[in-house]
Amino acid sequence: MSYVDLNPVRAGIAESPEGSDFTSILQRIRQKTKPSRKSKYATAESQPILMPLVKQSQDRHKNSIGFALPDYLELVDWAGRAIRDDKHGAISEQAPPILQRIGLEPGRYLQHLQGLAETEKPIMFGHVEQIWQAANSLGRCFIKWIGEAQRIYRTA
């Protein structure tokens, strides 16, 4: 999975995994930074449904991947920094870690996933700016639990 997600970086087409189009890692990042309402933002026709990234102890599915999203993002970031003679590109050593680049605060995010955060069922989830854009497009003036999103996502 990480090999495929790093193909655009290795080919020199993108500087980072989150900057590469049409990869599952970008789809996973976008799913975590968009509102959770599926009907308007993702359909089966527009995006394939990906196997969720959760700890194996939390998902008993026989094909469970066994990585939480922050762990997988860090793995891909780490692997993408390896410079290889047979590849054109790599993630710059000067680039901040991926969780910092996308503005995800891993401790708060993991608390949220474990049900230890202040709320377990936010209406929308992601960067505050994107939540407000989505709220405006839906004609909403108020979003419940936006404070939780502010604690989980920092400005990148």
Image: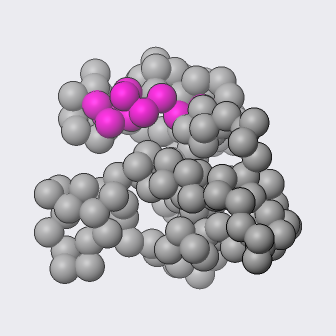
Foreground residue among 71 and 44: 71
Q: Residue at x 65, y 24 (%)?
A: 155
Residue 146 visible (yes or no) = no
Q: Which residue is drawn at 67% across and 34% down?
A: 96
Q: Residue at x 72, y 42 (%)?
A: 93
Vertical side of 63 occupied by 122: above or below: above
Could you say which quadrant of the image residue 115 lies in? Answer: top left
Q: Position of residue 59 (x, y in %)?
A: 19, 63
Vertical side of 24 occupied by 147: above or below: above
Q: Does the magenta stretch include residue 105?
A: yes
Q: Which residue is drawn at 38% across and 72% down?
A: 51
Foreground residue among 11 and 123: 11
- Residue 26 placement, left or right of 56: right
Dominant SS type (magenta): helix
Magenta segment: 103-112
Q: Position of residue 117 (x, y in %)?
A: 28, 26
Outermost residue to the front:
85
Q: Quadrant of the C terminus?
A: top right
Foreground residue among 130 and 106: 106
Foreground residue among 89 and 119: 89
